Amino acid sequence: MDSKNGKTLRILTFNTWYFGKKVENGLDKIVKHIKLLKPDIVALQEIQTALLFKEFLDKLGAEWSGVITPNIYPDIGIITTHTIDDKTLSITPCNKSMGLNIHLKNSTEIISFWGMHLDHHSYGPYAANNKLVTKMEQIFSGESTKNKTGRQDNIYELLETKSFMEALEKSDKIPVIVAGDFNTPSHLDWIKENEEIHGGWTIKWPATTLLQSKTGLIDSFREIYPSPVETPGCTWTTVNRYGPEWDFSIPDTLDRIDFILYKSQRLKPFKSFVYSGSESFQQVPNHEKNDYPSDHFAVVTDFSWVIK
């Protein structure tokens, strides 16, 4: 696509809910929605196997290529219609982050793109909305754990990754984009003005606070929609509004936990939105025939980019 300011770039982050296994023909539906959105680069989460990922790429078509984390349960994937530089592939030790360079076709431009899927245990908003929780330390105990596998720990691991920090240092020439499911709210969203929907708390969630303060990365959705009161942008959840305990009578806590962040003076987000297709969907446990295959809303950001 072209725009009056130069070239545009569409980024998508998509938690695939066990790679489509929770709905009928789920893999085909993931392919369908990616083709409808026409992104340039996609950060995927919850990929199940390398064999299934190959089948997925075959369904997408020859113009797509991708990489996944090289473990039994790959989890994170990055796909694109542009050209992946495999030599730049970098994966953090706990497999929570993966990055590489992507060369844009018909251009000399390069993107340093990082896919994320942070730890899902001890989900912070559940603690914050528990009336027996009285101290911030109790909430934060799930963000940095004794065995160092919490979401804050995942971010520290990323910040200790040499290739990531080098990419940030070069972001004036090669833009950096970080996208994925963080499994934590943003510190930009839990503010004094909306404490009443957050269990009475104002919280600087450590993962997003640490990542943005140490890197200068900008939250693309919140840059366009600065008020979390006016535009919450919740991505959790599409179909788990009520949990199976207590006969689906207790509501889940909705929040924005999927992000597209960037660092570059040459990139500017001009559109960002959450996505769940255009068809209505049923809640769990009546979700199997849903057209949209995920329990997360996807996030899309369109960037304008002035070509050198």
Image (tube, grey):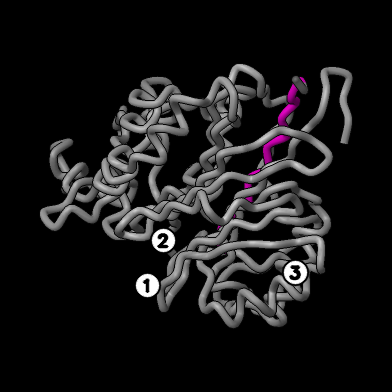
Q: Position of residue 121 (x, y in %)?
A: 29, 60
Please state if 45 lies on the left or on the right of 12 as rendered: left
Residues at badges 1 and 2 in contact (C-beta under 8 Å)?
Answer: yes
- Where disc 1 sits, the SS reads helix
Q: What amino acid is labelled 3 in the image?
A: Asp
**1 or 2: tag closer to the N-terminus:** 1
Residues 285 and 148: in front is 148
What residue is shown at x 35% (from left), y 53% (from top)?
Answer: 92
Label 2 packing within 10 angstroms: few (<14), some (14-19), many (20+): few
Image: 308 above or below 121? above
| Magenta range | 295-306
**2 or 3: tag closer to the N-terminus:** 2
> Can residue 286 be seen here?
no
What residue is shown at x 70% (from left), y 33% (from top)?
Answer: 109
The residue to which callout 3 is attached is 291
Please state if 72 lies on the left or on the right of 48 as rendered: left
Circle number at residue 250: 2
Residues at badges 3 and 1 in contact (C-beta under 8 Å)?
Answer: no
